[in-house]
Amino acid sequence: MKLTRTPDSPSPSRGCWRRGSRRAGLVCALLTFTALLSACSGSGLDAASGAGKSRQDASEDTDWRNWDAEEWARDVDDFTNPVIDGLWEPERMREARDPGKQVDSDIAEAQGVTDPEPTAVDAKRVGTPYHKNAAPVGKVFFDSPEGSQTCSGTVVKDPARPGRSNLVWTAGHCVHAGQKGGWFRNIVFVPSFNDKGLSSAELETATAQEMLPFGTWWADWAATSQQWISNGTAQGGNGAPFDFAVLHVKPAPNSDGRSLEETVGAALPVAFNGPRVQDVSQVSAWGYPAAQPFDGSTMHNCSDEPGRLSLKNSEPTMYRIGCTMTGGSSGGGWFTIGADGKTTLVSNTSIGPDPSVWLAGPYLGHTARNVFDEVSDRFAP
């Protein structure tokens, strides 16, 4: 599946993974984003959501490093992410690590709704430049008590602002620490990070244009599910079926006021209450794996026929595919082509084991739709 910018678009930003037998004859379908965009005309939209008050000021906040439990903003309406000019310099981005969310290889599975563990599918490097082959995909950077960290994200369409979306889809554990923590800080999105696919050594001397072709987009709002906030944990599968999040970002300084979608030239619709796992023949997961043997510098993807993974009978069944992508791919979008020919985002990377042989992502049902709608409605014209 190839995701490219439209020719006339404006020019100018460890969470999961395990399985064991690849399905014969499975081939990754290639699709130019020019055709994709002609097919992507919107999506059906449904919740407890976690959103937050954002501060628009660009002054440095010297208190952001205080992670004391009593000071760490936790509740759905406590998100704050003031812009700190010059914080996310290229060197700081290169040093960011994956958030380290993993599950045990023998993770408990509910009986009757879990398919056999999939065969590992080797992650493949995405062709460069990324802005022509995977325009909606980028990296999410943020600060946590453990330091600077990185996930992946996808530019998604906003029905309230057709053609002018500023929304990014990612994982809940990339914006909020879950049951024992609060909102992460200094959250930004960098579309087409390292556009030319330079090695980590080459990035040491790369120009800002090569590393950040469309600039750095600060999140001025974030939302995740109340289920993730209440139950999510850094280890294990707790909260994973609700491990999704939506960011609203501010225009980057070099975007001339254009929206994120206009700047990168692409966005994907989200398929809420979309096809069930057993009705999907192939899913492609995209992201920037950062844990060994990867280093977070280059974009990869995996394509596989999904299976079902159910952690608790009381929670939604998740998608699961064979894939060797590691931490840092968390939050990366899972794309599929429906019977109508439209390419949509149907999930995001949430959990996976060590060693990395599979990935699992949530089914985007009513709760996911309501999280999305809360952000979209808040910034509607």
Image (cartoon, rainbow, N blue to C red):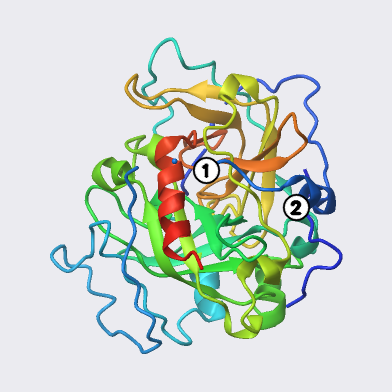
Residue drawn at 50 percent across, 76 percent down:
92
Viewed as shown, does residue 35 lie left or right of 203? right
127 or 96: nearer the eye?
A: 127
Residue highlighted by disc 2? 126
Mark 1 neighbour class, 10 Å CA radius: few under 14, some 14 to 19, many 20 or more: some
Front residue of 148 and 258: 258
Secondary structure beneath label 1? loop
Q: In the displayed structure, does residue 232 sit left or right of residue 300?
A: left
Q: How many marks?
A: 2
**Looking at this rendering, what residue extends furthest in the left direction?**
70
> In this rendering, would 181 be left or right of 381?
left
Question: In whole angstroms, how far apart are the C-alphas of marks 1 and 2?
Answer: 30 Å
Q: Nearer the viewer, residue 100 or 72?
A: 72
Q: Position of residue 125 (x, y in %)?
A: 74, 51
Local SS, label 2:
loop
- Mark 2: few, some, or many residues within 10 Å (few <14, many ≥20)? many
Q: Position of residue 123 (x, y in %)?
A: 68, 42
The residue indicated by pointer 1 is 45
Q: Foreground mark, 1 or 2? A: 1
- Tell me which amino acid carries mark 2: Val
